[in-house]
Amino acid sequence: LSVWMCLLVSYAQSLLGIPETRLTTLENGLRVASEETGQATCTVGLWLNCGSRYESERTNGASFFLEHMAFKGTKKFPQSALEQEVESMGAHLSAYTSRERTAFYMKILAKDLAKAVELLSEVVQNNILSDSDLECQRGVLLRELDEVEGNLQEVCLDLLHATAYQGTPLSQSALGPSHNVRTLTRQDLVDFMNTHYKAPRMVLAAAGGVHHNELVSLATKHFGSLSSEYEGDAVPVLLPCRFTGSEIRMRDDALPQAHVAIAVEGAGANNPDIIPLMVGNAIIGSCDITCNGEKVGNGCTYVFSWHILYRMARISMTEKLCHSYQAFHTTYSDTGLLGIYFVTDKHHIDDMMLLVLDTWMNLCTTVTESDVERAKNALKASFVGQLDGTTPVCEDIGRHVLDYGQRITLAEWNAQIDMVTPKMVRDVCSKYIYDKCPAVAGVGPIEQLPDYNRVRSGMYWLRF
């Protein structure tokens, strides 16, 4: 287990070497956060509280549409000029949209920070949104929707949201339906930007070769006039999204494998139960048969066998019950999905589902000290692995400031993880899993997927 020890040593060294994350709030409410490492490169970006959860049924997909329109030209930089500026810096420019968040960010040489901040400010404040570009992007978006439909994991997890949060905005996908792609107008996008692209909803984050005072100065210059006021009662407020135990099935016997996800309602971003639930998920781990048993845990690759460590992996792989599985906890502001997604042959769906339910019941009742210690170490190692490079660090800063109002350091995560005990894992997992109604989604040849009532009956054990 020498590799395991190396990971722990690396984690301890990471705790000692992490620079401070500095945070400043401008007069208009925009927050500026940075971590300075003295590198020759840096990543700078804008993170916004804006996504499909803030959209109506009619405007679902507006955030994603705006993401695609972001780099098509601004009042100061037409598309060709914008592309030339990015290319001349050798920069990497990217964006993404999720259910509660939109991000625009650039990886650049540290000396080009001022130009990068200027370009980002243009993208979110002075986008032209020309009619010709709008029509061109409709076709691009429709093709991307078709591609996503071919990603069965994405399809399965979107269906899981659709049934778990039915009747609420969280049921909507981040990309929106094809009908909206065809019908959203320029005015719809302008109105959406005017409502959501406000200073208090934004974080300008940077990591790498940046100086915080310089970043604050640039933010003041380029974002200081960004509005923080709303017209009338247009202040976006997140309404509670209720969880509904239910199922959704998309049977297609022509597909080679079944994709199944099961989840209960998890904890929101600011809920202290998140850490014990993370440890619980680390006990389950994840596994992919294509990795020959070498990749397990939270995305970390280990050289020792999964036979030693992960009970669910050991059983599912030894008995060839699935091709892969992963435990997940997708968190939102006030709720979350705590679940397991797996890919299997149609003949093993029933056995795999029973193994999932049995694994959950073990989390609630029989977790041991060794299970928890191993999971805590794996969780710590995953935190280090997720912060390798200026871009993931910058994203971590942006997300944390939006979710928590500050950056949660590795040392703070470490202290919270160390406090977790087997009893805490059992109690918290029982609170969220035991005798709860789950949401289930299945895609592919799922004739053998157990009836919902049978799945529900596996969410508790009779005790004598």
Image: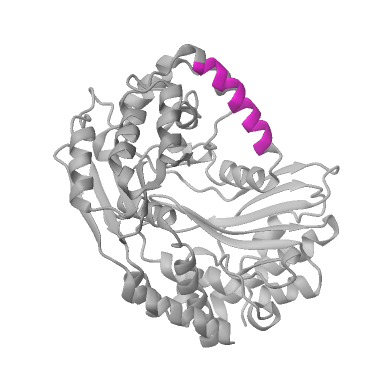
For this rendering, which residue is in front, 421 or 110?
Answer: 110
Residue drawn at (72%, 51%) of the image: 259
- Residue 24 part of the magenta segment: no
Q: Nearer the viewer, residue 283 or 19?
A: 19
Q: Residue 262: x and y, percent?
A: 63, 56
Q: What secondary structure predominates along the stretch shown in magenta? A: helix
Which quarter of the image is occupied by the C terminus?
bottom right
Q: For residue 247, say whether it is visible.
A: no
Name the residue at 81% across, 73% down.
319
349 and 45: which one is in front? 45
Which corner quadrant holds the N terminus?
Answer: bottom right
Q: Is residue 138 magenta?
A: yes
Q: Residue at x 25, y 26 (%)?
A: 233
The span picked out in magenta is 133-148
| Residue 433 in view here | yes
Q: Position of residue 98 (x, y in %)?
A: 48, 42
Q: Residue 157: x percent and y percent?
A: 61, 47
Q: Indicate the position of residue 287 as horizontal and vertical percent values.
A: 67, 67
